[in-house]
């Protein structure tokens, strides 16, 4: 049931009615080319009639007949063999939005995606069949098996996360999806993706250490998206294994997170990559954001010390709300050790972009400061964090006795 406006009520009360509709394929209005349309909703069950019971809603189906326009026929424009410049709006998977009503007022009737299209030669008609979003939930359900939680006797995920994950698999997202979920030659790959929508489980990656349930909660109030992980104290940490091994030197890595600095305890957020080195020691690439003091720091270090860059931005200290924080690390090198090239990238609650030119951690001269401004004033410093030794990240070798991936970073997220 939908609420009608005054125009619709007046048209329904009139003795003579005129129907109207609006149809968009792939965002393009094709209402003038619609020859016929039909929206059908039906329930189906595999139970005998005596035991049949209906509950919930079924997937709706919309059938639209399209004609051509100008001097071009519909098959020439929208058939499977037509040019992509015109037929792409009717390809399978494309969006369909249909509204219907009376007089000049319309109400939403269908929203879904194209399932199929057909055209007969010698005619001026193409039949498009679309199904609504419920159809995407008919696939097999699969949830990742958690690695963590059993050893610590701590919960890994809730029912909310399970439902959110199943909806994500159907293309319905409660938060931004993974940027590069699929393996493709020459393309980036998402190593760890944690929605934190009611749990620590991940479709890409594996939880390693989960915090004690008394130290955090999941809340909707103030969440950057639908739900957020909110610490109850300082120093709460969670970590994940990547789903694929990478080599250092040789790869470029980007870490990111959405943070609301107006919710929860503490003022510092840390995103850290732990690099397993030769099975005995570790190296670290770390992004720290301190919202109380207004600085951003990127560190490259190992057990003997390292270097860090620090930028002081007034906006980091003054603006409260949802931040998008991230750091880019370039570890490409022709040798066995590397001084990573680093770059912070932040988006403030008001949309302000905070970023600098990439900097290599081998530099020992003072960093150049960008021009001062009211929203992005920065005073970067370059200094050793423990000693004058460089932050090397040599190749890592497998360590059979350790369950930790031998050639992969371990991502962790903590608040202090």
Image (cartoon, grey):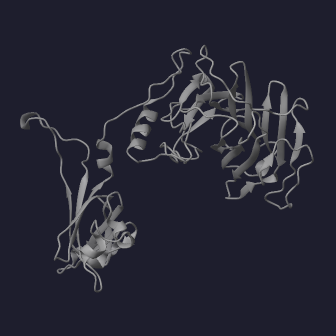
From the top left corner, tell me how far across and down residue 361 is, in percent. Answer: 82, 42
Position of the N terminus by quadrant: bottom left
The answer to whether residue 288 is above or below residue 42 is above
Q: In the drawing, does residue 13 fall left or right of residue 273?
A: left
Q: Which residue is drawn at 40% across and 37% down?
A: 163
In this view of the protein, which residue sits in the foreground, 117 or 350? 117
Position of the C terminus by quadrant: top right
The answer to whether residue 139 is above or below residue 67 is above
As drawn, the residue found furthest toward the left would be 50
From the top left corner, tell me how far across and down residue 306 is, in percent. Answer: 84, 32
As drawn, the residue found furthest toward the front would be 334
Q: Can residue 149 be seen in this snapshot?
A: yes
Q: Residue at x 22, y 41 (%)?
A: 55
Q: Can residue 103 be seen in this snapshot?
A: no
From the top left corner, tell me how far across and down residue 252 is, in percent. Answer: 66, 43
From the top left corner, tell me how far across and down residue 311 is, in percent. Answer: 83, 47
In this view of the protein, which residue sits in the foreground, 118 or 195? 118
As drawn, the residue found furthest toward the bottom would be 71
Res 219 quadrant in image: top right
Q: In the drawing, does residue 173 fall left or right of residue 250?
A: left
Q: How many marks?
A: 0
Q: Which residue is drawn at 92% across and 48% down?
A: 366
Q: In the drawing, does residue 225 fall left or right of residue 326?
A: left
């Amino acid at each position: 049931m939908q609420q009608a406006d005054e125009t619709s009520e007046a048209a329904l009360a009139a003795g003579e009615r005129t129907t109207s509709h609006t149809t968009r394929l792939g965002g393009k209005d094709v209402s003038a080319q619609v020859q016929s349309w039909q929206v059908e909703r039906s329930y189906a069950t595999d139970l005998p009639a005596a035991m049949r019971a209906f509950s919930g809603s079924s997937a709706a189906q919309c059938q639209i007949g399209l004609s051509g326009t100008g001097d071009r026929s519909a098959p020439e424009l929208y058939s499977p063999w037509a040019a992509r410049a015109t037929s792409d709006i009717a390809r399978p998977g494309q969006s369909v939005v249909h509204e219907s009503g009376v007089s000049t007022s319309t109400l939403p009737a269908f929203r879904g995606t194209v399932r199929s299209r057909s055209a007969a030669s010698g005619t001026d008609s193409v039949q498009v069949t679309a199904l609504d979003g419920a159809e995407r939930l008919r696939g097999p359900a699969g949830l990742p098996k958690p690695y963590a939680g059993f050893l610590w006797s701590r919960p890994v995920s809730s029912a909310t996360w399970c439902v959110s994950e199943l909806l994500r698999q159907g293309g319905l997202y409660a938060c931004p999806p993974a940027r590069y979920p699929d393996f493709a030659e020459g393309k980036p790959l998402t190593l760890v993706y944690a929605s934190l929508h009611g749990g620590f489980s991940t479709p890409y990656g594996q939880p390693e250490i989960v915090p004690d349930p008394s130290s955090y909660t999941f809340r909707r109030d103030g969440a950057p998206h639908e739900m957020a992980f909110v610490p109850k104290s300082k120093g709460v940490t969670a970590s994940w294994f990547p789903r694929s091994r990478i080599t250092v030197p040789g790869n470029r890595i980007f870490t990111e997170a959405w943070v609301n600095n107006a919710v929860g305890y503490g003022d510092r957020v840390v995103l850290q990559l732990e690099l397993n080195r030769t099975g005995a020691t570790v190296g670290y690439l770390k992004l720290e954001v301190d919202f109380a003091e207004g600085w951003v720091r990127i560190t490259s270090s190992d057990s003997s010390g390292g270097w860090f860059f620090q930028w002081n931005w007034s906006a980091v200290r003054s603006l409260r709300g949802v931040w998008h924080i991230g750091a880019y690390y370039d570890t490409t090198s022709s040798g066995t050790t590397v001084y990573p090239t680093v770059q912070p990238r932040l988006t403030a609650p008001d949309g302000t972009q905070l970023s600098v030119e990439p900097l290599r951690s081998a530099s020992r001269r003072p960093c150049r400061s960008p021009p001062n401004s009211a929203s992005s004033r920065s005073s970067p410093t370059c200094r050793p964090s423990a000693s004058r030794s460089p932050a090397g990240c040599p190749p890592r070798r497998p360590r059979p006795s350790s369950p930790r991936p031998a050639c992969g970073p371990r991502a962790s997220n903590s608040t202090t």
